[in-house]
Image (cartoon, helix red, strand yellow):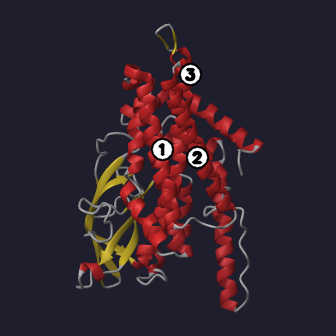
Amino acid sequence: MFEWSDEQVMMRDAMRQFIEKEIVPIHDELEHGDTPPYEVLRKLFSTFGMDMMAREGFRKRIEHEKAVADAVQRGEEPPEREKDVDAIGIDPSFSMIPIIELCRYSPGMVTAMGVSMGLTAAAINSRGTIAQKERWVPDLLTLDKVGSWAITEPNSGSDAFGSMKSTARRDGDEYVLNGSKTFITNGPYADTIVFICKLDEGNPPDERKVLSFVLDRGMPGLDQTKPLRKMGMHSSPTGELFLSDVRAGRDRLVGETEDLPSGGREGAKDTFSMERSGVAAMSLGIISQCLDVSIDYAKNRVQFGQPIGEFQLIQDKLARMEVHRLNVQNLVFRYIEMTKAGRGLSLAEASAMKLYSARAAVEVALEAVQLFGGNGYMAEFKVEQLARDAKVLQIYAGTDEIQITHIAKDLLRR
């Protein structure tokens, strides 16, 4: 794949029309008025039938899983799964295009959407039982319910597992959960929360199993704070969670077992890989918008008697932006082709994809601000917002420094 197909271009253009009509007019409210993004995202889903596609894809996935389970029980060869769909049953290009286009204007909306229908749903989809998937996943995939994935704690950022303090303690047939989480996307409004913690058996923290529980808003002892103030991504509500003796039955333990085949840590790492892949699509949207508005500005902004686009230093900036756009776009195309072929990215591959894309987005956005000069520093011209939003791509889902260690360790193991 080296370019979008005619069908994909049609969807892209339709998405742009929707954004111009439904999102641009309320853009300032989303970015500065504490307006949650969920209603307009639901309208997006219904307009393009994304909710129906998600439900249908989920139905096919569950039917296949049930068929496999029945075949295994009967001692028969399990049926093969179709290879032209991703984890939620949708051609990956049609989940990437909305991300790219939304990020041209409001990357925070994509973060809110991706954590709910992506990370939270995927955490249950990848390790949960069929009953758990049917109970929670469909509403997350359609945004009928808002989801959050809670792993980060006040004292455990990059060292998510080593410094984790949140615990689950057995109490009869239930677990008692305690701890706090911070920087949780959708935390203030989440209906469904995947809470990651360690099993407290009286053993040293480093030896404890990592477990994931699915919690619902309003459970006794669960407190969700108001949105936190932050540098960028204002259209993505971020909050804290506090758990005090929250009781959860085994039906809320992902997989309904403390002994998942590859462990709770591996499940979280799989989710990290998915999250890091999505950053490339977000970066492509930011880069594309910064390049487009910079080209227009360079053609029309006159200084020293000529358009600034005629100056070589401005041309250098535009050329570098285009190189980054092409590279990130090719990473996105590679991800789509790999997914359609039924091959997921390794953690190192996802880390490399995120590392380059995030750095490219930040560089391009800052260069756009520089190209605009004083106007670029003003909110009116929007590139200052994209610069603020881009920076977090180098921080969340693992900092640049963490991506480098994953890539290097993989190389040194070869």
Q: Residue at x 32, y 62 (%)?
A: 158
Q: Nearer the viewer, mark 2 or mark 3?
A: 2
Q: Secondary structure at mark 1?
A: helix
Q: Which label's residue is closer to the chain start, 2 or 1? A: 2
Q: Nearer the viewer, residue 329 or 99?
A: 329
Mark 3 lies on a secondary structure that is: helix
**Residue that carries the numbered disc 3 in the rendered image:** 296
x, y percent for residue 159: 31, 66
The amino acid type found where label 3 is placed reads Asp
Q: Quadrant of residue 92?
A: bottom right
Disc 2 from disc 3: Cα separation: 22 Å
Residue picked out by circle 1: 360
Which amino acid type is marked by label 2?
Asn
Rendered view: 310 above or below 154: above
| Residue 145 seen from this side | no
Reply above or below: 198 against 384: below
Residue under the point 35% across and 63% down:
151
Give the mark nearest the N terminus, 3 or 1: 3
Tell which of 354 and 220 is nearer to you.
354
Q: Please tell me which residue lies in front, 139 or 87.
A: 87
Percent of width and height locating residue 370: 41, 27
Circle 2/circle 3 CB separation < 8 Å: no
Q: Are marks 2 and 1 in contact (CB under 8 Å)?
A: yes
Indicate which disc residue 327 carries.
Answer: 2
Which of the 4 image quarters holds residue 269? bottom left
Q: Are marks 3 and 1 in contact (CB under 8 Å)?
A: no
Place of residue 49 in the rendered image (x, y in percent of width and height, measured from the top left):
66, 47
Residue type marked 1: Ala
